[in-house]
Image (cartoon, grey):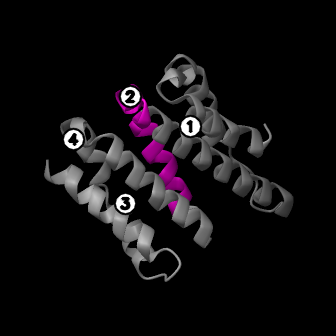
Amino acid sequence: VKPAVLACFGDIALAIGGNFVKYLSPTLQMLDQAAHTEISKDDEELVEYLGMLREGILEAYIGITQGLNDGCNSVALLPQLGNIFQFLEIVCRENEEESMSKSCIGLVGDLAVAFVHHAAEAAPFFQKSFVSELISRGQSVDSIREVALWAQTKRDVLVSC
């Protein structure tokens, strides 16, 4: 799979909003399969490919989350939250690039906005220790601080509901 293709699903979701629901299941299945890609750390080209693949997956999740939320259909993502947060945890553990961290933090914030009305089901995902660590790390980096503060605020609102 070409990483740029995955990001296109996010763009499509943003463009058609809530109507993306009819494409959600196969898209999420493909993203989940791509998220579980494992490679040999010895091959620099494969390591670079995996980074690009993860960026594409993040962009897709961000676009889908925003698109469904704009169309008032974010609840359709609820069954996938476990997989999304599992992916985020892997990316956070294995990545140190600012751009990737910013995307992860942004996705956490977008998900918090999308699920504020489903806080009881969603809150346990946002209370995971890696989420707090990710946001805290982001607050200490000038280029990410604003996004991290925003995500922290949205996360706090969801968790307090």
Precedes in sequence: disc 3 or disc 1: 1
User: Which residue is at 54% across, 59% downward?
Assistant: 103
Residues in magenta?
69-93
- State the SS at label 1: helix
Q: CA gap, disc 4 to disc 3?
A: 16 Å
Residue under pointer 1:
14
The answer, for residue 93, to whether it is visible in the render is no
Residue situated in front as seen by the camera: 8 or 33: 8
In the rendered structure, does residue 91 fall within the stretch colored magenta? yes
Q: Is residue 52 above or below residue 7?
A: below
**89 within the magenta span:** yes
Q: Earlier in the sequence, mark 4 or mark 3?
A: 4
Residue 82 point in image, percent of width and height: 40, 38
Q: Which label sits in the foreground, 2 or 1?
A: 1
Image mark for residue 131: 3
Is the residue under label 1 in contact with that under label 4 (CB below 8 Å)? no
Residue at left 37%, top 74%? 136
Reading the chain from its start, which is encountered first: label 4 or label 1? 1
Q: Determine whether label 2 and label 1 are within 8 Å by CB.
A: no
Look at the numbered disc 3 and give the secondary structure of its residue.
helix
- The span from disc 2 to disc 3 (Cα, nearest Å) is 19 Å
Q: Can you tell which mark lies on residue 83? A: none
Residue labelled with disc 2: 79
What is the chief secondary structure element of the magenta stretch? helix
